[in-house]
Amino acid sequence: MTLSAPERAGIEEMVLADIYVLQRGQLSAVLAPDSDNIPTLCDPQPHVTCFECLPLGFGEAQLVSARGRLGDARCHLVLALPCPDGPPYRSGRIFTFQRTFNGISWRGGSQSYNGGSAIGFIVATPQGTWQ
């Protein structure tokens, strides 16, 4: 899908407090609330990666456990933020699982869609209670 400039919902223009990972069969896409608070397809799609934290001196059992959590839909995400100097990315924002949303409405360019299933993530802050 190619969007014209006025319809693009890029990461740089959005204040990201939460994101959604839209599940469409084997594919997934990142949505973020637009100015009307409606989940909107990000274009271009941001670089998002799952991660797990391990303590210093972690053991084999902790590594195996962390590896298993990476495949879980509730894993933590880091969204790479563009750098003014260009790649590589030098900063990002951490998101933690919020809940699963079924039957959501969302936008992709100038079209609206209904009945989507998405996993919601909220930005993790130093004062938050996330693990």
Image: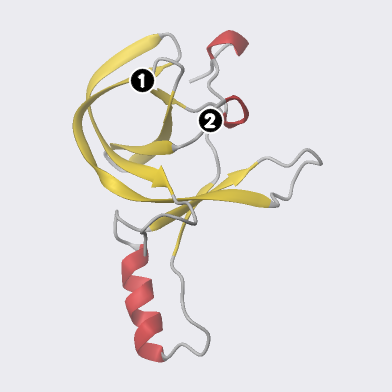
Tell me if residue 68 comes above or below residue 121 in the rendering. Answer: below
Q: Mark 1 points at which residue?
A: 38
Which picture quadrant has residue 44? Answer: top right
* Amino acid type assigned to the residue bearing label 1 in the image: Ile
Q: Where is residue 82 in the image (x, y as percent from the top left)?
A: 68, 40
Residue 83 at what x, y percent from top left? 73, 42
Residue that numbered label 2 is attached to? 15
Q: Residue 114, labelled with which disc?
A: none
Residue 68 rendering spot, x and y as whole percentages: 31, 71
Q: What residue type is labelled 2?
A: Val
Q: Label 2 crowding class (10 Å Cα cut-off): few <14, some 14-19, many 20+?
A: few
**Chosen colour scheme:** secondary structure
110 over 95 or under it: above or below: above
In the rendered view, tell whether residue 87 sits above or below residue 116: below
Between tags 1 and 2, which lies in front? 2
- Name the element at disc 2: loop
* Residue at the image position 35 percent from the left and 81 percent from the top: 64
Q: Earlier in the sequence, mark 1 or mark 2?
A: 2
For residue 99, what is the image quadrant? top left
